[in-house]
């Protein structure tokens, strides 16, 4: 009685015919490859039973000076923070708006200030904060005041003292911040003007957007123990760890920013923003940063200021950026730039293009692990960059499924994260088979980034709109957020928040004997640390394009040695699956008990 042993290398391979992948795993869900073998992913448990408000697009964990864990979550409609076992709304007031030159007018012997604020959208009784105004007619009318609307483009407020002349002024840096929560942004992308802003081939090549067609995403980072937050195409806000206070606008920073981050030099960067000089036009390739150690100083003409402005060459638009060691990576829609701190007062940073035709598809579609970065390009291919080298395509043997079913115009929702406990990079994305929200993921074992022969890719069905690696805090785990706003610790336990954890893994077609029809009588699975029952199926056929015959074996409990099965054919696939609470198994080799039955 011959016994056939299948010793399968790590990783799924499904982009070719099933027989072309013989001797490999071909399909699976919620099973990873770790230390060369397959195992079910860990479970997840709720961090808090209160869901977030809105659809979460970014989650970020950091610790304060007392080593307390904070978790910030940016949704399409709110900014919230988890601290001390509770959830707090810290949605900032806004948006901050930079007005035109000299937008204020006063009348002699009157405290009434008239503001020209085109298409302000405010109503009588709303309060606004005015900052950055210069003195006019002996008053400097900054502060917070209720307004009276005159027209769609003008309103008035009453200052604390009278002007002594009829004049207009205020200078070129008057910022108006409505004192009500930031309005909700888009949940979904719609496609639209400008390369990369929506569906493929929509708009003109390399032109900037003329409207906001993006789902609201956030960039979140830490300034010491404080939070820096930027809703895409909005201002930059800071939160100082007081749960009774909202995040507040850094009113001296640019007011329209694509992506914000904090550099190792303690400078806040605005990537893709409005220019410093009048008329303060938005330019999708401009980079501005604050002075070293001062996130409120952004003007370049101040004495000893290290704030500066740069413009990247080429076309397209800045999409996102990341810190890599002491350097910065900045992706446009078509290229990758490396930012290096050179320390010159005239030019503190320099930005060099390190790759072309390798832009990033969305603001969260990248991950940095040590000296390497991985991201998704606008062509839905995967790229990898190692400091000191050139960006390169990263082969993925399960890429077709990802590209073929990407939800149209929703690529800005793609989110990527490392999962340090398992040397993993994970890509959550919206799959059109499930709708327009993130519903599935791909993952790669990090050694593949180095060209390791362990080219291990895998995937799963799991709805996570935001995901982040383990925060720097004791007893924490990776964090994922589902479409309903529920936050979970991942890789914790062996259930789906107390419910059944579902997974499966399936081999490609393997010839048992190309010259003979074989009858399979049973399997000796090689399981380790099994928890819960595992179902065993054999899918057989007589020729590569013949009909599948599926036979189920015995459901195997922990410690069971053999699963009896009766299946006949030349080729066979083996499938393991489970849906139980708790559930786990790690898989070694497969031994098939088979005997020839004839040549037909």
Image: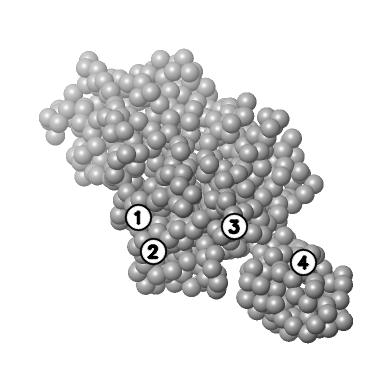
Q: Secondary structure at mark 4?
A: loop
| Image position of 327 with respect to 201: above or below | above
| Image position of 548 with respect to 203: above or below | above
Residue contact at pointers 2 and 1, CB within 8 angstroms: yes
Residue contact at pointers 3 and 1, CB within 8 angstroms: no
Q: Residues within 10 Å of mark 2 (few under 14, many from 20)?
A: many
Residue occupying the point 46% across, 14% down: 559
Q: Mark 4, mark 3: which one is toward the viewer?
A: 3
Q: Secondary structure at mark 1?
A: strand
Q: Quadrant of the N terminus?
A: top left
Q: Which residue is mark 1?
A: 335
Q: CA distance from mark 3 to mark 2?
A: 31 Å
Q: CA distance from mark 2 to mark 1?
A: 9 Å
Q: Mark 4, mark 1: which one is toward the viewer?
A: 4
Q: Which residue is mark 3?
A: 302
Q: How many marks?
A: 4
Closest to the observer, 119 or 250: 250
Q: Can residue 212 be seen at all in this image of the molecule? A: no
Q: Mark 4, mark 2: which one is toward the viewer?
A: 4
Q: Which residue is mark 2?
A: 316
Q: Secondary structure at mark 2?
A: loop
State the image quarter where residue 542 is shown: top left
């Amino acid at each position: 009685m011959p016994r056939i042993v299948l010793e399968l290398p790590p990783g799924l391979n499904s982009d070719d015919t099933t027989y072309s992948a013989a001797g490999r795993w071909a399909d699976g869900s919620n099973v990873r490859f770790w230390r060369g073998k397959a195992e079910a992913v860990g479970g997840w448990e709720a961090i808090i039973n209160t869901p977030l408000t809105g659809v979460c697009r970014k989650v970020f964990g950091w610790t304060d000076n007392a080593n307390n864990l904070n978790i910030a979550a940016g949704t399409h409609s709110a900014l919230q923070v988890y601290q001390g076992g509770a959830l707090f709304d810290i949605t900032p007031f806004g948006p901050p708006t930079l007005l035109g030159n000299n937008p204020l007018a006063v009348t002699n012997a009157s405290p009434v200030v008239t503001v020209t604020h085109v298409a302000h959208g405010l109503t009588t009784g709303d309060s606004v904060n005015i900052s950055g105004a210069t003195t006019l007619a002996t008053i400097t009318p900054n502060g917070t005041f209720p307004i009276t609307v005159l027209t769609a483009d003008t309103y008035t407020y009453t200052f604390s003292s009278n002007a002594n002349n009829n004049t207009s002024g205020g200078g070129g840096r008057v910022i108006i911040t409505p004192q009500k929560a930031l309005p909700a942004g888009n949940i979904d992308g719609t496609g639209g003007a400008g390369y990369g802003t929506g569906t493929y081939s929509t708009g003109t090549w390399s032109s900037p957007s003329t409207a906001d067609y993006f789902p609201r995403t956030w960039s979140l980072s830490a300034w010491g123990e404080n939070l820096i937050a930027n809703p895409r195409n909005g201002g930059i806000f800071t939160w100082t760890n007081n749960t009774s206070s909202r995040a507040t606008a850094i009113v001296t920073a640019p007011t329209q920013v694509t992506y914000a981050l904090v550099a190792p030099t303690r400078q806040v960067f605005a990537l893709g923003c409005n220019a410093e000089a009048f008329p303060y036009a938005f330019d999708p390739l401009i980079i501005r940063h604050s002075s070293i150690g001062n996130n409120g100083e952004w003007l370049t003409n101040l004495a000893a200021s290290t704030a500066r402005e740069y413009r990247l060459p080429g076309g397209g638009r800045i999409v996102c950026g990341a810190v890599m060691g002491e350097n910065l990576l900045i992706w446009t829609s078509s290229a990758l730039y490396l930012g290096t701190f050179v320390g010159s007062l005239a030019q503190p940073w320099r930005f060099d293009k390190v790759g072309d035709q390798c832009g990033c598809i969305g603001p969260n579609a990248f991950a940095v692990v040590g000296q390497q970065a991985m991201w998704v390009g606008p062509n839905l291919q995967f790229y990898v960059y190692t400091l000191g080298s050139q960006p390169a395509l990263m082969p993925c043997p399960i890429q077709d499924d990802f590209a073929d079913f990407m939800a149209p115009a929703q690529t800005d929702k793609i989110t990527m994260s490392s999962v340090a406990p398992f040397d993993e990079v994970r890509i959550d994305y919206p799959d059109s088979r499930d709708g327009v929200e993130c519903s599935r993921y791909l993952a790669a074992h990090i050694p593949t980034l180095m060209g390791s022969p362990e080219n291990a890719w895998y995937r799963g069905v799991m709805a996570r709109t935001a995901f982040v690696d383990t925060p720097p805090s004791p007893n924490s785990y990776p964090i994922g957020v589902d479409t309903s706003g529920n936050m979970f610790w991942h890789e914790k336990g062996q259930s789906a928040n107390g419910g059944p954890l579902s997974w499966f893994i399936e081999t490609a077609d393997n010839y048992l004997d190309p010259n003979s029809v074989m009858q399979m009588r049973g399997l000796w699975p090689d399981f380790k640390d099994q928890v819960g029952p595992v179902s065993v199926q054999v899918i057989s056929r007589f020729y590569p394009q013949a009909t599948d015959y599926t036979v189920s074996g015995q459901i195997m409990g922990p410690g069971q040695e053999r699963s009896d099965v009766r299946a006949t054919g030349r080729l066979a696939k083996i499938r393991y699956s489970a849906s139980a609470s708790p559930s786990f198994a790690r898989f070694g080799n497969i031994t098939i008990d088979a005997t020839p039955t004839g040549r037909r």
